[in-house]
């Protein structure tokens, strides 16, 4: 899905207010192309006596011009698109497939290319994903563990070529076993010559290849992929990296991700997530789980806290239709990183809280523009992307 692409590089990076305003202005113009389709669908849904009488659009396209500025990139220009289509006959409960190419170029000659394809067929029982991408983007390294400081920042520029493949199928009720494979070619183009990365004491600085096959097991009863209002999404993933599969590193990774959604009333949803990630063996530093950013606690930059084990919990109250297509969110979370599960603690006081604004861009697919303001213990940040955080 699209969130595998643009959302990944936005994770943990600060966006200036100027960038936010420019992108939101562009989104308003881009939405006009689909307004007639979504308004027609609203009228049909309201007038329909039963779902069988509703004609569902067979596809739509959402285009997002990317115009912004960050200290790391200078001016950035590009475009992102999401093409919704159906491999089955479209219906009210049919899950759409998506193709989401994204291209971004900056005045510092940084390039980001994502070509995600997410496929759903056989009335949603079968699902596959193909996610190739190329990223060259400056980042920051602060060390490993919870006892790091913003003063220890090291700038470095990685170059990555990734291919991620997924397949799962519903077999018993909502139970979905699946297969996973990811291959990543990684190298550092630039490092701080006086920093820890240049010292050779951190695995992953050299050119490397990680080949990571795995298995997954999921239970998914969400009513919508982009903006769920009820249901559960439980996932357990086990992956292994070894020389047998062509990898330069030997390690295992385990992920448990539990998400729940409860409708509280008209236009109100309570959403929660518990996420745990563990890595054993000898992983490179870029394969260690991160606590902050889009995939963790908003309010901390993505690369600030990393270690072999991560655990976090977060809660959101979501309110739609506060003013037209605009809605709002309140969120909070807490977590930790440690070298082993037994060393996780809440004593590190790694909490976050914040609020956000939502704009319902595509009403048929419930796709939203998300703008969040998050605060952590000693850090903060803005986050701008598509779709809910979880």
Image (spheres, rainbow, N blue to C red):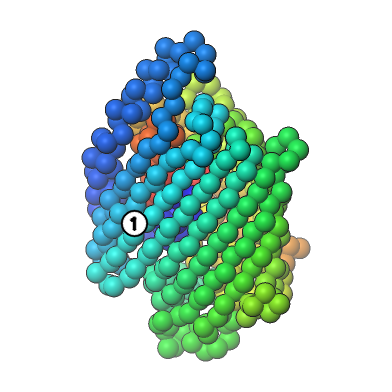
Q: Is residue 268 left or right of residue 83?
A: right
Residue 108 x, y percent position in the rendering: 27, 72
- Label 1: which secondary element: loop
Pick the front one: 77 or 301: 77
Residue at horizontal 48 percent and vertical 16 percent from the top: 53
Residue 184 x, y percent position in the rendering: 54, 71
Residue at horizontal 60 percent and vertical 46 percent from the top: 127
Q: Which residue is mark 1?
A: 15
Q: Is residue 244 left or right of residue 107?
A: right
Q: Is residue 338 above or below residue 170?
A: below
Can you say which quadrant of the picture contains the C terminus?
top right
Q: Is residue 383 above or below residue 27?
A: below
Q: How dense is the environment of label 1, judged by Cα within 10 Å: few (below 14), some, or many (20 and up)? A: some
Residue at horizontal 34 percent and vertical 68 percent from the top: 111
Residue 216 x, y percent position in the rendering: 69, 53
Res 205 visible = yes
Residue 69 x, y percent position in the rendering: 27, 60
Residue at horizontal 39 percent and vertical 71 percent from the top: 136
The image shows a total of numbered marks equal to 1
Pick the front one: 89 or 251: 89
Res 335 visible = no
């Amino acid at each position: 899905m699209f969130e595998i692409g643009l959302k990944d590089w936005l994770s943990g990076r600060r966006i200036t207010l100027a960038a936010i305003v420019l992108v939101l202005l562009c989104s308003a113009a881009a939405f006009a192309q689909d307004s007639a389709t979504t308004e027609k669908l609203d009228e049909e849904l309201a007038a329909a006596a039963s779902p069988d009488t509703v004609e569902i659009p067979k596809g739509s396209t959402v285009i997002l011009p990317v115009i912004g500025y960050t200290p790391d990139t200078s001016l950035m220009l590009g475009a992102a698109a999401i093409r919704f289509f159906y491999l089955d006959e479209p219906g009210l409960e049919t899950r759409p497939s998506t193709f989401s190419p994204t291209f971004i170029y900056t005045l510092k000659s940084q390039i980001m290319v994502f070509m995600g394809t997410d496929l759903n067929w056989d009335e949603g029982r079968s699902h596959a994903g193909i996610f190739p991408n190329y990223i060259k983007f400056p980042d920051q390294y602060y060390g490993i563990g919870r006892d790091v400081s913003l003063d220890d920042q090291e700038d470095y520029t990685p170059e990555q070529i990734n291919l991620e493949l997924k397949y799962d199928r519903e077999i018993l009720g909502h139970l979905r076993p699946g297969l996973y494979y990811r291959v990543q070619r990684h190298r550092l183009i630039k490092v701080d010559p006086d920093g820890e990365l240049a010292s050779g004491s951190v695995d992953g600085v050299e050119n490397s290849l990680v080949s990571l096959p795995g298995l997954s097991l999921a239970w998914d009863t969400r009513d919508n992929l982009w903006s769920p209002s009820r249901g559960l999404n439980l996932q357990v993933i086990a992956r292994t990296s070894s020389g047998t599969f062509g990898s330069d590193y030997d390690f295992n990774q385990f992920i448990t991700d539990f998400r729940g959604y409860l409708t509280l009333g008209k236009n109100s949803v309570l959403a929660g997530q518990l996420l745990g990630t563990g890595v054993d063996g000898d992983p490179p530093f870029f394969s260690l789980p991160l606590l902050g950013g889009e995939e963790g606690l908003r309010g901390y930059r993505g690369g600030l806290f990393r270690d072999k084990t991560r655990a976090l919990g977060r809660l959101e109250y979501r309110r739609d239709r506060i003013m037209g297509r605009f809605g709002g969110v309140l969120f909070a979370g807490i977590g930790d990183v440690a070298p082993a599960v037994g060393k996780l603690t809440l004593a590190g006081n790694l909490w976050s809280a914040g609020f956000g604004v939502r704009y319902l861009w595509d009403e048929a697919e419930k796709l939203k523009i998300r703008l969040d303001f998050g605060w952590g213990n000693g850090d903060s940040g803005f986050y701008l992307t598509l779709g809910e955080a979880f």
